[in-house]
Amino acid sequence: MSNITTKRIIEEIAELIDIPDSSYELAENRYKDLADWFGRPEARCSKLDPHLSPQGSFRLGTVVRPLDENGEYDLDMGCRLRTGITKATHTQKQLKYLVGDDLENYRVARSIKETREEKHRCWRLKYADTLSFHLDVVPSIPEGVARKQMIKEAMVKNGSADTLAKAVADLAGAITDNTLISYPIISDDWRISNSEGYALWFESRMELAKLLLEKWASAAKAAKIDKLPTFRRKSPLQQCVQILKRHRDVMFKDNPNGKPISIIVTTLAAAAYQGEVEIDDALESILIRMGGLIRSTIPQIPNPVNPVEDFADKWAKPEYAQRKLEKNFREWLVQANSDLREIQKVRSAELVAKLAHERFAVKLTSEELRKIPGLDLVATPEVSKSHTIAIPPAKPWSMK
């Protein structure tokens, strides 16, 4: 059962690590501007029915502020050419450079100084304005009927509802990857990707909180729109993912290559979520269930929208053995559970402020905490015996 003091502490932390709606809106404007550019008659891609869509944490509404106040945000975007290109007519390399040419023209037209950067699966542009971020654009084409059917059947076998599995599978695409032998030749060997389908699955997990559906529908009606953008819904699941990602970032501040990757944290949290309405109940149950969702066989953490893909595939690869990825994940999960129990039991304003700073890199004074409605905190510091890992405080992002 939810504890009002614990709930308010966690809500306060979640609010401080979130980014303002204006930042989401700025990112959305960047997406729309680029989509308009690709739709221009002069664009090479315009006759190929380009569809550009946000991906990743901005799409899911789970972005967290960087630990470094000068840190960059990752903006992921898919560019799907829906007609005129197939695996039988074009190579992955041809598709990638077709999209890349329009992106380069966009960079010049928008006076973006840094040249576009080629990554294995995407093109990267770096912006430096009111929101410092890099934009990764992933070229793709629709996946074939046979593979979509395979994905649907795998999802149903994995426990997804038939209607959700079909909707997700229909969004599957084939992306470019210059590490593949098949990259420069006509071949059926393309990687499958489905960021839009993943977002649909994630939203289906958010909506397990039935009591929130009416609230969201009412807010959308008041705003005279069909549906609230995902980032404005602020479900317990979204906030829990943000809190977990922030805790991980702080714990692995000095070992970023060894930290659990966001897609694993997000997927396990969403799969573990059972529709709890209160954020403290949701966080507790997610942390209890997450570890039990890791399989002992391959795939250990299957992609929910492509169950044959393993999000934890690097855990067992010899070239990543030195990073100790699985060990790090399990140790992080233990520490996150321990720190949640600490928050649940402390009633000292000073110790809560210390925990918030050391574990989540947020700045909260004991005086500020005691002014928050619903918090039953005392002024006398308590001695904590369960603080076992000494983490140097990270410099939080300026809240000016």
Image (cartoon, rainbow, N blue to C red):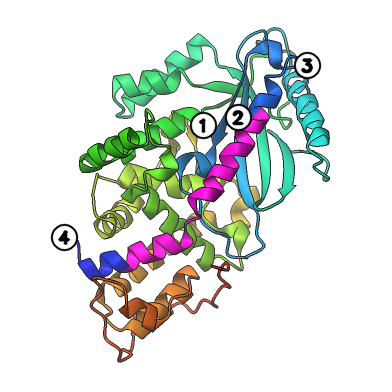
Ranked by sequence position, the earlier of labels 1 and 2 is: 2
* Magenta residues (range): 9-34
Task: Residue type at mark 2: give it.
Answer: Gly
Give yes or no for contact between labels 3 and 1 (Cβ–Cβ under 8 Å).
no
- Cα separation between marks 3 and 2: 20 Å
Q: Which residue is the site of mark 4?
A: 1
Task: Tell me the mark number nearer the camera, choosing from 3 and 4.
Answer: 3
Task: Residue type at mark 3: give it.
Answer: Glu
Which quadrant: the N terminus? bottom left
Q: Is the magenta stretch mostly helix, strand or loop?
A: helix
- Cα separation between marks 2 and 4: 41 Å
Ranked by sequence position, the earlier of labels 3 and 2 is: 3
- Cα separation between marks 1 and 2: 8 Å
Ranked by sequence position, the earlier of labels 4 and 1 is: 4
Ranked by sequence position, the earlier of labels 3 and 1 is: 3
Report x, y in % for residue 73: 62, 51
- Describe the element under mark 3 as helix, strand or loop: loop
- Cα separation between marks 3 and 4: 59 Å
Task: Residue type at mark 4: give it.
Answer: Met
Q: Is residue 308 left or right of residue 258?
A: left
The crowd level at tag 2 (other Cα within 10 Å; few <14, some 14-19, many 20+) is: many
Q: Which residue is the site of mark 3?
A: 42
Give yes or no for contact between labels 1 and 2 (Cβ–Cβ under 8 Å).
yes
The crowd level at tag 3 (other Cα within 10 Å; few <14, some 14-19, many 20+) is: few
The stretch drawn in magenta includes residue 28: yes
Task: Residue type at mark 1: give it.
Answer: Ser
Give yes or no for contact between labels 4 and 1 (Cβ–Cβ under 8 Å).
no
Which is more toward the observer, 184 or 128?
128
Q: Is residue 294 visible?
A: no
